[in-house]
Amino acid sequence: MIDEIPEKFLKGRGVSNNPASRFDDLERLRVSDGWDLEEEEITYLQTELIPEFPKTIISRNKSPDIPFQQSINPYKGCEHGCVYCFARPSHSYLGLSPGLDFETKIFYKPEAAKLLKAELSRKNYNCKPIALGINTDAYQPAEKNLKITRSLLEVLSKFNHPVSIVTKSSRILRDLDILAPMAEKRLVNVMVSITTLDKQIARIMEPRASSPINRLSVLKAMSDNHIPCGVLFSPIIPAVNDTELEAIFSASSENGATMAGYVLIRLPYELTKMFSRWLLDYFPDRKKKVLSLIKQCREGELYRPQFGKRMTGTGPYSEMLRLRFVSSCKRHNFNRRNRETNLNVDLFSAKNQQLNLLL
């Protein structure tokens, strides 16, 4: 009988293989042929940056589950390598795997700023806050040199256009010179995604993202520069990081966060098997419990994408999380709606649209 060979752990990567996408007819499986020959192990995999030239840059949605209608993703794929990332299956549309391909084949949009300027200059453009970096992290490692996110912020700033940013990276601190002046006009807020305060768990869940302590330092820097900021506990993984909600919110509050949110882990398409395999590799003793609790929140399945339920789930466990979230928000005065946290759309006008002549 031929036995399946465990995948090799790759340093700095969230997963160790390239599972077939849901559109592939065939699936590769590493097996032992009985010869047991030692093969050279691949311990490092270089990231490939691929330019992409879309015709538009702003994506629009009508989902009732998310607090924005417009978003921009400067990149496709994400080198942070978060094993749980709901966006991994999107790489399948490119003919690539949601596994290692998602974190090593990064598509970037060199004309993003040019496209944004053109869209904002249209006479019929309706100004609504833009969410920056949703299916990818706008401040992933490639941003250090490519500076696409920075170029987008420069355009948004000149047009007085409001923007909301979600990131796991301390690289955002580079752009304080743009963000701080925007904050004075109520044109920006920043949510820092923190999933754990345990650096060991962070290292295996999100290997190339900033460490938990560095993410807390981002909140501190944002607060010190009077930029409205908050913490996003996303995703909550039952029996892995769920016990940390109160500690994460407390640490975030101490570092200046005034807003908070959470999302229960989502496992669409190929991610279901990938996450199960990750649990087997790193938390074999908890795998059954973790998957059982997720199913309890998803009406007996590992994922159900219904509007109104997909972000927080249903059932007793989900309700317990909700109550803990509400209690923690009250304790730290999170999410108090006020003038400072509401983004301002009034400064964007037809006059600002003419700024393209000067940019």
Image: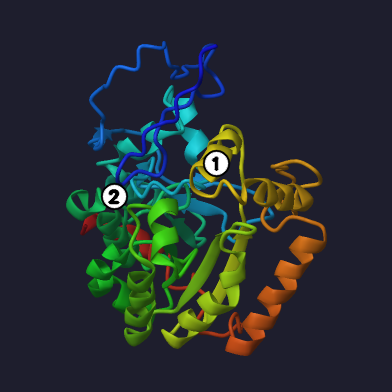
Say which amino acid is labelled 1: Leu
- Give residue 113's mark: 2
Q: Is residue 194 left or right of residue 209?
A: right
- Give residue 302's mark: none
Residue 220's place in the image compared with 264, above or below, is below
197 or 179: nearer the eye?
A: 197
79 or 157: nearer the eye?
A: 79
Q: Answer whether residue 106 is visible to the viewer in this image.
A: no
Q: Residue 97: x and y, percent?
A: 44, 28
288 or 196: nearer the eye?
A: 288
User: In percent of the image, x 52 and y 34: which residue is there?
Assistant: 89
- Give residue 280's mark: 1
Say which amino acid is labelled 2: Ala
**What colouring style does the render use?**
rainbow
User: In percent of the image, x 34 and y 65: which residue is there?
Assistant: 211
User: In percent of the image, x 45 and y 52: which residue is there?
Assistant: 205
Q: Residue 295: x and y, percent?
A: 75, 47
- Disc 1 crowd, CA 10 A, few/some/many (<14, 14-19, 20+): some
Instruction: Looking at the image, tell me whether mark 1 or mark 2 is earlier in sequence order.
Output: 2
Q: Is residue 15 left or right of residue 41?
A: right
> In terms of image quadrants, where is residue 104?
top left
Q: Residue 193: x and y, percent?
A: 46, 64
**Disc number lying in front (1 or 2):** 1
> In terms of image quadrants, where is residue 40?
top left
Q: Which quadrant does the N terminus fall into?
A: top right
Q: Secondary structure at mark 2?
A: helix
Q: Are marks 1 and 2 in contact (CB under 8 Å)?
A: no
View extreme (left): residue? 145
